[in-house]
């Protein structure tokens, strides 16, 4: 029913079309945001994402942003769970779960130590817990107006 593949550059326009629903932007704005977020990452030149197709149409996307954290004087490579979308016609068919499981399997054999999800919403939170994700802390909200205010 679905074909699920790792990201390839020829999928970018179809992904951007799908992301217009998630991001509420024009196609051109989505392409620009996608490029900045996924292709121009300062830590890694790879794009880490899973793309789902139904009859040659992109109907799902699950993206991860590679980051490097410094914890106790040690570099720790971490995948931040980023964008996830399933087209409205294909929802409630297990695609979110399947894309996530395939992504974790594909990306687990890399230099990245773990996956960290800082942005779960009310829809994905319970699904993530059912797939074995562990809650580290309750969601907290912060607001600051400048980096200077954050570090002082």
Image (spheres, rainbow, N blue to C red):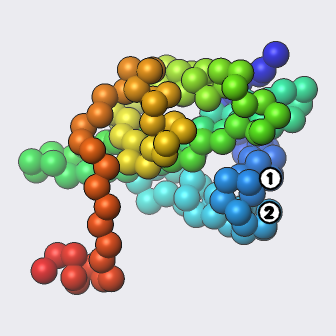
Q: In x, y percent, where is residue 52?
A: 73, 30
**Which residue bears the numbered disc 1?**
17
User: In the rendered image, which quarter is residue 27 located in?
Assistant: bottom right
Q: In x, y percent, where is residue 25?
A: 72, 66
Q: In x, y percent, where is residue 48?
A: 55, 40
Identify the mark nearer the N-term, 1 or 2. 1
Viewed as shown, does residue 143 lie left or right of 104? left
Query: Which residue is at 10% across, 50% downward?
Result: 73
User: In the rendered image, which quarter is residue 9 located in?
Assistant: top right
Residue 27 is labelled as 2
Residue at the front extreme, as displayed: 122
Q: Residues within 10 Å of mark 2 (few under 14, many from 20)?
A: some
Between 39 and 101, the residue placed more toward the observer is 101
- The secondary structure type at the circle numbered 2 is helix
Query: Which residue is at 72% across, 31% downward?
Result: 91
Query: Which residue is at 22% across, 83% downward?
Result: 148
């Amino acid at each position: 029913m679905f074909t699920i593949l790792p990201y390839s550059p020829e999928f970018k326009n179809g992904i951007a079309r799908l992301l217009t629903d998630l991001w509420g932007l024009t196609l051109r704005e989505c392409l620009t945001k996608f490029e900045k977020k996924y292709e121009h990452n300062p830590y890694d030149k790879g794009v880490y994402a899973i793309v789902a197709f139904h009859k040659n149409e992109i109907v799902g996307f699950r993206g991860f942003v590679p980051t490097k954290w410094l914890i106790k004087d040690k570099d720790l490579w971490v995948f931040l769970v980023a964008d996830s979308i399933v087209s409205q016609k294909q929802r409630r068919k297990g695609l979110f779960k399947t894309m996530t499981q395939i992504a974790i399997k594909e990306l687990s054999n890399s230099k990245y130590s773990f996956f960290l999800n800082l942005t779960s919403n009310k829809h994905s939170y319970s699904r993530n817990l059912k797939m074995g994700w562990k809650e580290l802390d309750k969601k907290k909200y912060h607001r600051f107006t400048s980096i200077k205010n954050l570090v002082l």
